[in-house]
């Protein structure tokens, strides 16, 4: 299969309303579904593995190709390895791709919703500096967005602030502790009983 078709397939799956897939839009992005997890695993696990082995670096020359890389490293593992430590194994790679892409201004060539997911690895980071940058980027993006997209991005701003505040408070995401084999402090255990403590 043509390499370009492969990264376009990744991007189309994530952003287009395709009748042959189990979910699209908000249900795909923010929902949790065994059916969607199974679909992503079946359709994209081999692509993820090949990218992790160093394949298709030529994708990174194009904004949509880099976005496909970021989706594969940031979003797909959270479906393929849900509730397992491996869900976070690719996060550092995703953040590196984001920062390099921003230095090349590739993010500015993307649509508003594409940029939401271009920046998402920063929101997933357990480093405070990344969280601060995440909030700044989403706030800036909200200023550019209009209509329904603005509503979506404003929700992402709120989420970015919540993520930032958790890292500022704990230095990590307590809801990942179980999957990563980390012991939770008493404060973290109390926090995890509250609504909105997990993402």
Image (tube, rainbow, N blue to C red):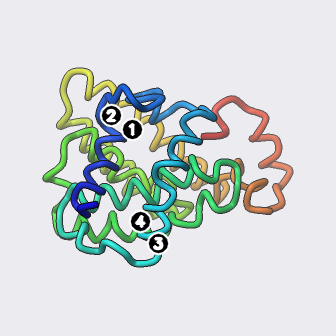
Image location of residue 77, percent across then percent down = 54, 55
Give the structural element (helix, strand or loop) at label 3.
Answer: helix
In front: label 3 or label 2: 3
Query: Residue 153 got which mark?
Result: 2
Residue 13, compared with residue 179, is above or below; it is: above
Q: Are marks 2 and 4 in contact (CB under 8 Å)?
A: no
Give the structural element (helix, strand or loop) at label 2.
Answer: helix
The residue singled out by tag 1 in the image is 157
Chain-order first, disc 1 or disc 4: 4
Q: In this view, does 160 lie to the left or right of 163?
A: left
Q: Which residue is drawn at 35% across and 41% down?
A: 13
Q: Is residue 160 left or right of residue 84?
A: left
Chain-order first, disc 3 or disc 2: 3
Q: Are marks 2 and 1 in contact (CB under 8 Å)?
A: yes
The residue singled out by tag 3 in the image is 52
Q: Do the residues labelled 1 and 4 touch (CB within 8 Å)?
A: no
How far, Cα to Cα, is label 3 from label 4?
Answer: 14 Å
The residue singled out by tag 4 in the image is 95
How far, Cα to Cα, is label 2 from label 1?
Answer: 6 Å
In the rendered image, the residue lying farthest to the left is: 109
């Amino acid at each position: 299969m043509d390499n370009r078709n492969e990264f376009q397939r990744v991007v189309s799956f994530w952003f287009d309303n395709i009748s042959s897939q189990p979910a699209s839009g908000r249900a795909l992005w923010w929902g949790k579904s065994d059916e969607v997890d199974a679909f992503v695993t079946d359709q994209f696990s081999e692509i993820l593995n090949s990218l992790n082995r160093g394949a298709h670096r030529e994708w990174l020359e194009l904004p949509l190709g880099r976005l496909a890389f970021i989706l594969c490293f940031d979003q797909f593992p959270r479906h393929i390895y849900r509730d397992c430590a491996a869900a976070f194994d690719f996060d550092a790679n995703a953040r590196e791709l984001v920062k390099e892409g921003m230095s090349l201004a590739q993010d500015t060539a993307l649509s508003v919703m594409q940029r939401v997911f271009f920046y998402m690895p920063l929101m997933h980071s357990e480093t405070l500096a990344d969280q601060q940058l995440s909030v700044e980027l989403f706030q800036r993006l909200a200023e550019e967005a209009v209509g329904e997209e603005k509503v979506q991005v404003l929700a992402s701003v709120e989420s970015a602030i919540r993520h930032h505040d958790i890292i500022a408070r704990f230095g990590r995401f307590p809801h990942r502790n179980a999957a990563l084999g980390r012991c939770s402090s008493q404060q973290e255990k109390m926090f995890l009983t509250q609504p909105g403590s997990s993402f």
